[in-house]
Amino acid sequence: MTETMLENLKDIFRFVLQLPDDASVEQVNQDNTPKWDSMAQVSLVAGIEGEFDVQLELSDAMQITSFESCVKLLEQKLGQ
């Protein structure tokens, strides 16, 4: 995954989870982020699909439980 793609993904996480613009998101997960609820999950998936032009199945969406897990999933989906 390119640096630009990573930065775009970080921006999606910051926006959806209402984090400060300069917040580090590498350690963000469902357990340590109060704003990460079911609606945020749907918004994350929609933002990721739109930004990276991928279609995520429900099973894919359920794998996104942290920023790190999202990066790994996208690398698989994008073949990187």
Image (tube, rainbow, N blue to C red):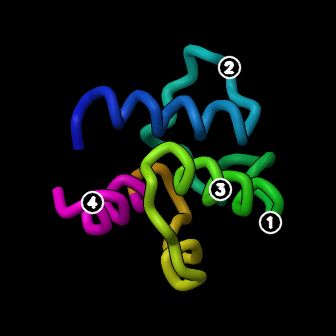
Q: Which residue is mark 3?
A: 46
Q: Which residue is mark 4?
A: 78
Labels 4 and 2 touching (C-beta < 8 A): no
Which image quadrant: the C terminus?
Answer: bottom left
Mark 4 Cα within 10 Å, few/some/many (few <14, many 20+)?
few
Observer-nearest of 10 and 8: 8
Residue type pointed to by label 3: Ala
Residue type pointed to by label 1: Ser
Label the magenta part by its dominant secondary structure. Answer: helix
Point out the frontmost of discs 3 and 1: 3
Residue type pointed to by label 4: Leu
Say which mark, if any, is on residue 20. 2
Work out how far the residue at label 3 is from the one at label 2, CA to CA, in angstroms: 20 Å
Name above or below for residue 78 compared with residue 13: below
Work out how far the residue at label 1 is from the one at label 4, CA to CA, in angstroms: 25 Å
Mark 3 Cα within 10 Å, few/some/many (few <14, many 20+)?
some
Work out how far the residue at label 4 is from the one at label 2, CA to CA, in angstroms: 28 Å
Labels 1 and 4 touching (C-beta < 8 A): no
Q: Which residues are magenta?
A: 69-80
